Image: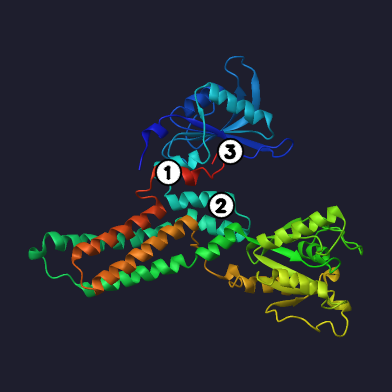
Amino acid sequence: MSNPLILADTIVAIATAILPEQGSIGIVRLSGSTSLEIAKTLFKTPGSQLWESHRVLYGYIQDPQTQEVVDEALLLIMQAPRSYTREDVIEFHCHGGIIPVQQVLQLCLELGARLATPGEFTLRAFLNGRLDLAQAESVAELVGAHSPLASKMALAGLQGKLSTPIHSLRSVCLDILAEVEAHIDFEDDLPPLNEQVIQSQLEQTLGQVKTILATAEQGELLRTGLKVAILGRPNVGKSSLLNAWSRTDRAIVTDLPGTTRDVVESHLVVGGIPIQVLDTAGIRETIDQVEKIGVARSHQAAQNADLILLTIDAQVGWTSEDALIYQQVKQFPLILVINKIDIARANYIENLPQIERIVKTAAAKSQGITELEKAILEYVKIGNLSANNLDIAINRRQSAALTGAKIALEQVQETINNGLPLDFWTIDLRTAINALGEITGEGVTESVLERIFSRFCIGK
């Protein structure tokens, strides 16, 4: 797929995060036919350095109008087709911060480059055949990864570990379609179609499609993470639990009820899964207007969470207040956390409801955290993610396309079993082929491309 209107001009963007007094290097990236010309206009090299592809040059960036030196920098040259976009690519490696890169960006714009749209460098890599669409999506997932395992999965996708089996499955379907169409057009000149062989090929293809499709839930969990809300009445140790779990003092801990007035967040990684932990205000009846707002936000956090850690105090036992909170949240996925188990009263288990998952902790002493993490991993039903093969874990768009391919292949099998004419076979075979092609980008529409690449950062 190509689009000369998109590829005709030269684009530029700042390719690194820029913050004042942070980051030693700031990169301005150019891609397009005039990239090298712009670089030679702006970059002055002392000595006799060679302007060759895949060389790093040292020099100064100068304003061509005023001859004023803007920055001392390095220049990286990557000429087509040996570049990320398969176009001429230039990178100015400037000093970090805001001012140098913005000045260099402005100079490039004045020399005819256009500011890149979000994801346009990767879009060009796709349009020029450098990456397929599944690999391009992996680029965004790698940049946005929230855990080492999510990063590893995205890198595997970038290396083609999803694209390769999808291309293979699509190729099988194309071969079957070609054979069926040949028998439609030249039935008298060919031996009878071997339906048993085709059924076997379809069964194997469908099995592989289902195997890949089964990774969708795991992939989504690694990409988006899990939102966990710590809920309970005041002074049961919710803030202590957050602090022990995150190994920080994010939440204020006192013996006074109602200390936590708002939702406190902490971000963790458990078994490869990014987890957003919300420590909420203690739920109770109160006349304090600020505390009332905190309690309302606690209820909202519970409704938005993927999992609730309903926390009670083992020193006090199950109370009527605990029971009231439980009635309000029992329809949600939850784990009962019995905290302060180190100072528990003898009959703390009296009146406990029948809750499947119970964990005992002593948060003030950082005890029971490992057991809590194990219970959370058991809840998500994938155990130790790092032990699983997540080389291919599809995203929502890919899952939708693969589901379409699965349905189409099942329909082909049903068509064959019902003894329908070969023309009917081709309808669903084409649907399966098109659905598989959507994953890697064959025949994908411009509106789909726009939706995908608009989620990228500028400069990537």
**Label 3 element class:** loop
Name the N-terminal-most of marks 1 and 2: 2
Which residue type does callout 1 highlight?
Answer: Ser
Name the N-terminal-most of marks 1 and 3: 3
In front of the other: label 1 or label 2? Answer: 1
**Label 2 element class:** helix
Q: Label 2 near label 1: C-beta < 8 Å?
A: no
Which residue type does callout 3 highlight?
Answer: Ala
Question: Can you say which quadrant of the picture contains the C terminus?
Answer: top right
User: Image height check: is 290 above or below 43?
Assistant: below
The one of 382 and 101 positioned closer to us in this rendering: 382
Can residue 404 be seen from the camera position used here? yes
In front of the other: label 1 or label 3? Answer: 1
Give the left or right position of residue 178, taking residue 317 as reference: left
Which residue type does callout 2 highlight?
Answer: Leu
The residue that mark 1 highlights is: 447
The residue that mark 3 highlights is: 15
Residue visible at 37% across and 62% down in the picture: 405
The residue that mark 2 highlights is: 142
